[in-house]
Image (spheres, rainbow, N blue to C red):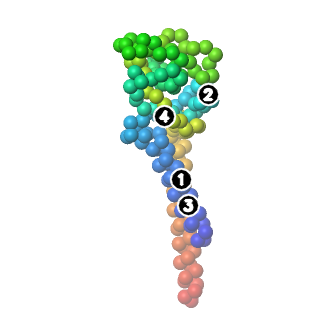
Amino acid sequence: MKAIRIIAKILSFLFLGIIISLAVLLGGVRLVGLSPYTVLSGSMEPTYPVGSVIYVASVDTSELKVDDPIIYTIPGGTVVTHRIKEVINPNSPELAFRTKGDANAIADGAPIPARDVIGKPLFAIPYIGYVSKAIQEPVGLVSVIAVCAAVFILSFVADSLATKAETAKKSEAEE
């Protein structure tokens, strides 16, 4: 029974570590000035695969150059990550960027005004975006809560059974 108790504790701590890591990676990074964005299309593959979370820092747009990846908004509020292929009107209030997705054959149409640039990706973690997207859905959130509850209940039950077994063993030894 001692082995069950140890395994239950290890699983509980492991699961707790995973939950805390996900919380930090999906939200806590905002405390250090980074914004996470989930990659929804393959336009920047293989650099940023679909399902990745990109961590973006704000940037002085006058420092951006050709081949820098940027994240920006387009009319309608959609957020896009593409690579700069041309800097238009540098050192001017009309600074803009022509962009292109790494996996796209042609450059994007209209230039992106500097005011629409959110920032520059610092790094990305593949596949974590699927987890982020799943827990934003009611079914996913309920599933995560149910799994957390099940792990902690099983841990408690295993600990209780191990304690009862030890108590019974001590009682038998005393008789």
Residue pushed farthest front?
Answer: 91
Q: Is residue 105 left or right of residue 29?
A: right
Instruction: Please tell me which residue is depicted at 45% across the width and 32% down the height of the picture.
Output: 56
Q: Amino acid at mark 1?
A: Phe
The residues tagged by marks 2 and 1 sit, at their Cα atoms, a distance apart of 31 Å
Q: Which mark is drawn over residue 24?
A: none
Q: Secondary structure at mark 4?
A: strand
Q: Nearer the viewer, residue 149 or 45?
A: 45
Q: Could you tell me if residue 129 is visible in this image?
A: no
Q: Nearer the viewer, residue 83 or 64?
A: 64
The residues tagged by marks 2 and 3 sit, at their Cα atoms, a distance apart of 37 Å
User: Sequence order check: which comes first, mark 4 or mark 3?
Assistant: 3
The residues tagged by marks 2 and 4 sit, at their Cα atoms, a distance apart of 16 Å
Residue 15: image x %, image y %?
Answer: 53, 53
Residue 55: image x %, image y %?
Answer: 48, 34
Q: Which residue is disc 4 drawn over?
A: 122
Q: How many residues crowd around disc 4 within 10 Å: few (fewer than 14), some, or many (20 or more)?
A: few
Select label 2 or label 1 by which is in front: 2
Select label 4 or label 3 by which is in front: 4
